[in-house]
Amino acid sequence: MRSYLLSAAAAVAVLAHAPSAVADMAAAEKWVDEEFQPSSLSREDQLAEMQWFIDAAKPFAGMEINVLSETIPTHAYESKVLTKAFEEITGIKVNHQLLGEGEVVQAVQTQMQTGRNLYDGYVNDSDLIGTHARLQLTYNLTDMMAGPWKDVTNPGLDLDDFIGISFTTGPDGKLYQLPDQQFANLYWFRKDWFDRPDLQKRFKEKYGYDLGVPVNWSAYEDIADFFTNDVKEIDGVRVYGHMDYGKRAPDLGWRMT
């Protein structure tokens, strides 16, 4: 039997021997007024959404969900505050554990390799999107939310509201991770190389447009190919038009734990 893990912030509920819990609209009102402000929704709309959570959670009252994420302030808030809110509103307990990033990656890898259910959900880097799409050991959120999970998918959920949704979508066009917090995605380049008239001339002669910061992946590939295969060497040093992490190296810093 294939074992699946749920990637990112959402999690699949697993029945545990827990005392019965009661969903509470009074608790929902308290959280809306004291914690869930400011909001783009009116208070009336917020309470309607809370009522949906209460109703959808009824079959799962008393369940426990085990989630793992790395230790950063965003997830500490989720672990200490949002889990409490979720339990009081829905009656579902979330055990949100915080560990170092390397330990999170190791747990994800172990679960995928062994099939043992260490955690029900993970908040893990979107860099793993290729792994999730290839191995198919992570729930395909696109199909699940439209199918088996439709009744427990918030009807007010608008995926277009999420920044970075393209980074958590696989090559098959399916969503495997729901963005929780997003690092800025930066494009680092050697401006001094881009500013050299001789390289600008060679690039334009070959590609028909000016050498500059790429505005799409096609231009990125042109630039990568140009410096790697045409320029090859600058000031006596072999150069490349693209760098990605493939093995441990000091310049990768936090990427390797």
Image (cartoon, rainbow, N blue to C red):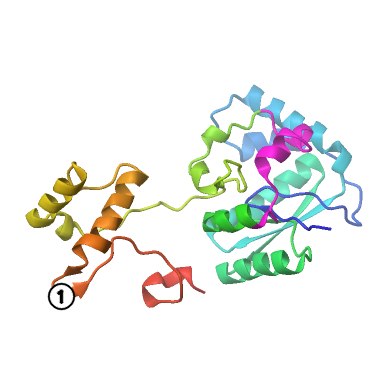
Q: Assess disc 1: are there few (<14), some (14-19) or many (≥20) residues with their C-alpha within 10 Å of its C-alpha.
A: few
Q: Quadrant of residue 56?
A: top right
Q: Could you tell me residue 124's position as x and y percent?
A: 59, 58
174 shown above or below 14: above
SS at badge 1:
loop
Residue 144 is covered by the magenta coloring: yes
Q: Residue at x 79, y 37 (%)?
A: 148
Nearest the viewer among 71 and 154 is 154
Q: Position of residue 185 (x, y in %)?
A: 40, 52
The one of 152 and 27 positioned closer to us in this rendering: 152
Camera sees residue 11: yes
Provide the residue span drawn in magenta.
Answer: 135-155
User: Quarter holding the N terminus?
Assistant: bottom right
What residue is drawn where x is 77% and y is 46%? 87
- In this view, the residue in front, 142 or 123, is 142
Q: Is residue 159 above or below residue 85?
A: above
Across the whole image, how many numbered discs are drawn on residues? 1
Whether residue 38 can be seen here: no
Give percent across and percent down for residue 119: 74, 61
Locate residue 191 relative to residue 245 in the image: left or right. left
Q: Amino acid at mark 1?
A: Gly
Identify the image quadrant of residue 97.
bottom right
Query: Which residue is drawn at the image coordinates 32% and 50% (left, top)?
Result: 220
- Give the quarter of the image for residue 129: bottom right
| Left or right: 133, with 13 as reference point | left
Q: Is residue 59 magenta?
A: no
Q: Residue furthest left?
A: 197
Tell me residue 190's x, y (percent): 22, 60
Instruction: Judge left or right: residue 257 versus residue 213.
Output: right
**Residue position marked by numbered label 1 in the rendering:** 236
